[in-house]
Amino acid sequence: MRRIAQWAFAFLLGTMLAPGQQLAEPAPGTFVVEKDLMIPMRDGVRLATDLYFPARDGARIEAKFPAIMERTPYNKDRASRSWALHYVSHGYVCVAQDTRGRYGSEGVWHMMTDDVQDGFDTASWIVRQPWSDGGIGTLGTSYPGGTQHALALSNAPGLKAMVPVDAVSNAGYFGMRNGGAFELRFMNWIFTIGAPTGSRASRDPATRAALEEAGNNVRQYLQSLPLRAGLTPLRLAQEYESWLVYAMSHGTNDDYWKQPGFGVVDQMANYKDVPVYLVGGWYDSWGRQTTMSYMALARSKKSPQKLIMGPWIHGAHARSAHGQVDFGPAAAINGLEFRLRWFDRWLKGIANGVENDPPVRIFVMGGGTGEKTAEGLLMHGGRWRDEKEWPLARTRWTPYYLHGDGTLSPEKPGITKSSTSYDFDPRNPVPTIGGNISSGTGIMLQGAYDQKCGEHVWNCGNSLPLSTRRDILVFMTPPLEQDVEVTGPVDVKLWASSTAPDTDFTAKLIDVHPPTRDYPAGIDLNLEDGIIRARFRNSLEREQLMKPGTVCEFTIQLYPTSNLFKAGHRIRLDISSSNFPRFDVNPNTGEPLNGHRRMAVATNTVYHERDHPSHVVLPIIPFDSSAPQR
């Protein structure tokens, strides 16, 4: 548990610093800190807050300053080691606050839902202070990115600029519930981070030890689902257990998931019109939600809205290598300076031209040498490109069809009857190997990986490629004759049936690298994946079980990507019914979510015929020699 906590801090620190960069502490006497101010909220609960002030010779400078704020569940004390001392040296008052019920703050923690009013109340307190010039900027990654969205949805006074990175948003569509399935990383978050570190319960050493033991056994709890209230040590942290059991049981994307704090796209009318720079990654757990939020903000707001998407895993935009892949040194950005430029423009009025930057900047992965680096990583490479919108206006939405012989091609199947069946046994789910993961420490790998089992994947049990499993259907193009760029969201249209009243269908897009001297077996490189729970096939807002044997239409929404499939590579699509522990496993029984007592093997059938032409819609980008590339 200690190693997990240390890793989490090092990872959050890495979200600000460029590779090899050390956070330089300002000279002695140039800042002062007021620790643990208890700021009262409207209901009397007080939130622990640290303030960092510019100083001269050890004394606070008596002037008015703009504020930069982070509201975090991960311990406000870390602000001094990751961002506060940098920005205070540039003339900002830095505000770091523990969210409700976490670390030094009073009250009872609730996942995201208190952060709207608490953020508003904190902003109101800031603008009333004699040192405040009335302006507030915000930063933070992941959960603290979500608290920024919550603040904007409160129409907080003084809010002038935001930089939400990999931010919690649109959680009922993707992120917490995903196509109706539950993302088990949040079970891992509760068991290993939320309950045993920083919670009210963890302040008692004996209780913390019991919660840490449960966290150390999280793999076994994952294999023993469903999670029932009161039957694990998690009952010692009641608010955490209550939320987790509810979230795992509540699949419908209704008002709960759409409320401020969880939702952004459904709350645009309430979102304050301020400059927002959204940062996301192709391998981030919130990648699709980040692009969803940008599209909604760009359509509805007059203030500048910007988006940058890199080849990054969650919270790691200052690094260029992720998983088993290196994307080249240009892939990393300096998080401290990146944010400073945004804040200087909107909080201080410095004419640095940031508003004139292209609205969208993307990293197109691929095009590298394919060789093995000195660190033993695949050089997949890539390059930056500026764009005017998302998705790209010049996209050619191209269906690639599944065929009975395992091929994937733009030609629509002409055969009258063609299908492939497989048995999906929920007791033996397909292991997760990389992907859009966060809070996965100890149970999942993040980012780009060869889709091959081994000792590095705890629930594999062998060292074979995933493609050898009988419950994975593989569809693949011939080796490409020319380069193909795929940039944008990826949807899979599937016609399928099942012997079960409820089951899952999963899809994964893969860049198949051909054999080379360094990789004689080639590399099956995952790009994006997705899932649909059959009971939510018609709508995420209502459940409808299947009639066994009936052919139904499904849409599996994969996360967005930007990848250059080089000539000689293959485009591959894997279809299956599980991806564990990325998603909870469907028992195939039709029982209530997180309430099953039985498991059943389902025979699932995918159709690839004239009347049921299952396909993936690829956002293909034609080569444009005039597009700016860097």
Image: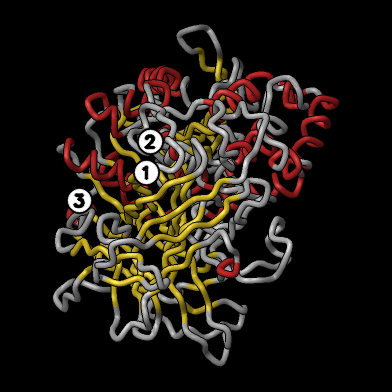
- The image shows residue 283 at horizontal and vertical percentages of 46, 57
Lateral position of residue 185 relative to residue 362, left or right: right
Q: Is residue 357 left or right of residue 208?
A: left
Q: Please count the marks in the image.
A: 3
Dot 2 amino acid type: Asn
- Residue bearing the label numbered 2: 170
For mark 1, give the secondary structure: helix
Give the residue furthest to the front: 416
Which residue is located at x 30 percent, y 43 percent?
292
- Identify the residue at image location x=38%, y=24%: 254
Give the residue at mark 3: 355
| Residue at the limit of the structure toward the top, as seen here | 43
How crowded pointer 1 is (Cα within 10 Å; few <14, some 14-19, many 20+) is rated as: many
Q: Nearer the viewer, residue 607 or 579?
A: 607
Circles 3, 2 touching at the beta carbon (< 8 Å): no
What x and y, as percent, mark residue 444? 63, 53
Against 219, residue 118 (above or below) is: above
Q: Mark 3 vs mark 2: give the one in front.
A: 2
Q: Residues within 10 Å of mark 2 (few under 14, many from 20)?
A: many
